[in-house]
Image (cartoon, rainbow, N blue to C red):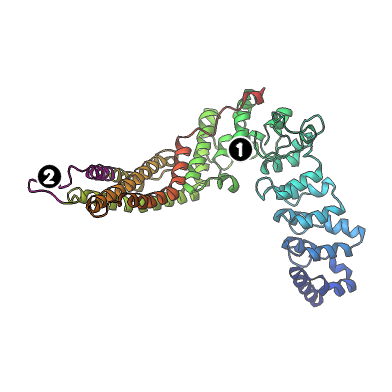
Amino acid sequence: MSYEYQHTDLLIYKAVFDDNWNSVRNIFQEHPDLRTKPINSRLETPLMIAVGTDRSHDFVKNLLSSLSSDDLIRVALAEEDKEGDTALHHAAQIGNMIDATLLLSYSCKPETILHKNNVGGTPLLFASWLGRKNDMLEFLFSKLGVLNPPPSGIPNESLVHGDLLSPAIEGEFLVLPDESDQSMPDEKKGQQYVQDETTFGVVILAYPSIIWASDGFYLFHSAISQRREKIYNLVYQMSSYKAFIASHVNHDTKENALHIAAKLAPARRLNIINGAALQMQRELQWFKEIETNFVQPACKNAYNKEGKTPRMVFTDAHKDLLKEGQEWMKDTASSSTVVATLIVTMAFAVAFAVPGGNKNEGNPVYLDRGAFMLFIISDAIALFSSATSVLMFLGILTSRYAADDFLYTLPKRMTIGLVFLFLSLAATLVAFSATLSLVLQDKVTWIAAPLLVITSIPVGLFGVLQFPLLIKLVYSTYGPSIFHKQNKRMIH
């Protein structure tokens, strides 16, 4: 590359990032070829770079306006960089709706949206990686004309073919509303976008052959890989399909369904659950479900192309998540143990130093008062609850932290520990309030009501901070399984 080109390339780069078309207008007029010439080692054109910034919209608009009709089609839509990506790939990858709309205003042919790069990635697939159903994915689907079903209410059959299937699954698209919704006007039925996976049960029933669609694996395998439990639940009950896929082994990778379940879930599906420990639990629930209720016994110890069994794949794929889960469990248990230990010590000490002291014969001075009985009962509850909590947290700290422990053992101990820690904290505050009431009741007769309010503040704070975690632990460990029979009305 000559010095002149190096100089102009730098000027164009600066103009692109500054969204300053006027600074290079004269250069482009003198050297029109620079508008379409790659200006870096990745063979990216000024248009690709401008689109990739998602802010240089004025530059993109002026650049496209300056091109002839032939150059528009070739450069704006078909020119590839070193990776085989077009300008639309760049727009779709970052969700740049403004420039994507402008690019497709010149030509929105299916081959533009489904243009494959060097590894087979299309703009549509790139858009699906943005996570869930998004504006870019919806926009590209609409340009392909596959989201709106015909008047018959049947999903558009083109959705189930080839390059459209994976983005539809990745983006959680459904093309039909719930047919039971009689309140929706007929002209709007079939035009609503539904995110619920039941994403998709209607499509399966309308086109059963979609189950055999392959993009490296069958739809059922895709449901496992993408952790789509509702699709899994629906297809699982179709016994004829299940029987075949349960024993199916991918020809290229030598992997069965359990190998697929053993791999780490996509980040966007993993992150719907907070906390590495609960994420690890959900991954184990999937693996155990496929291992116990789906694959044939021979598949459990089958080797893939790399010579690994499903369990070996699971261990390798989840080692980082397992480490994060261990650290989270240890940190939570350690900090909770400190609090519980303090409560044990305090509750034990005050049991022998009751408020008001003892009479000469040893009986407490306030033995006959109701507040004293409240104190004694609360202190006993605090002592035994905090001791139980300490034991549970110690059980977590001394655990071997095997992967399977995150399925039930560790969550159970954490749940019990948190429940009794909350109970001991509440009982301690009640005992403290009862003590103050006993000591001050003769002097301040109205002390009971303010003490009740003050006591509720730390208990409420603990509930706000810890109860969400406790609820998640209980629901994930003891709640209904995510794997269950789908609505029979949908199946038949």
Q: Which amino acid type corresponds to the residue marked 2 in the rendered image?
A: Asn
Task: Please report whichever mark, 1 or 2, sits nearer to the chain's N-terminal start.
Answer: 1
Percent position (x, y) of residue 393?
A: 34, 46
Q: Where is residue 183 in the image (x, y as percent from the top left)?
A: 72, 31
Q: Is residue 338 above or below residue 367?
A: below
Quadrant holding the C terminus: top right
Percent position (x, y) of residue 217? Answer: 66, 37
Q: Residue 363 carries which label?
A: 2
Separation of marks 1 and 2 at Cα, in angstroms: 66 Å
Helix, strand or loop status at disc 1: loop
Disc 2 packing (10 Å; few <14; some 14–19; many ≥20)? few
Q: Is residue 86 visible?
A: no
Q: Position of residue 142 (x, y in %)?
A: 79, 44
407 sits left or right of 60 in the view:
left
Q: Give the range drawn in magenta.
A: 357-384
Q: Which of 131 and 344 is in front in this view?
A: 344
Q: Do the residues labelled 1 and 2 touch (CB within 8 Å)?
A: no
The amino acid pointed to by label 1 is Arg
- Would residue 69 appear left or right of 96 to someone viewing this image? right
Indicate which label's residue lies in the foreground, 1 or 2. 2
Q: Nearer the viewer, residue 315 or 468?
A: 468
158 vs 41, nearest the viewer:
158
Identity of the residue drawn at 65% across and 26% down: 241
The residue at the point 80 percent across, 34 percent down is 187
The quarter in which the N terminus is drawn is: bottom right
Residue lying farthest to the right in this orientation: 69
Residue 135 forms part of the magenta stretch: no
Label 2 residue SS: loop
Please indicate, yes or no, whether residue 258 appears anywhere in the rendered image: yes
Give me the disc on residue 228: 1
Going 7% across and 45% down the picture, which residue do you hit? 361
Q: Does the magenta stretch include residue 364?
A: yes
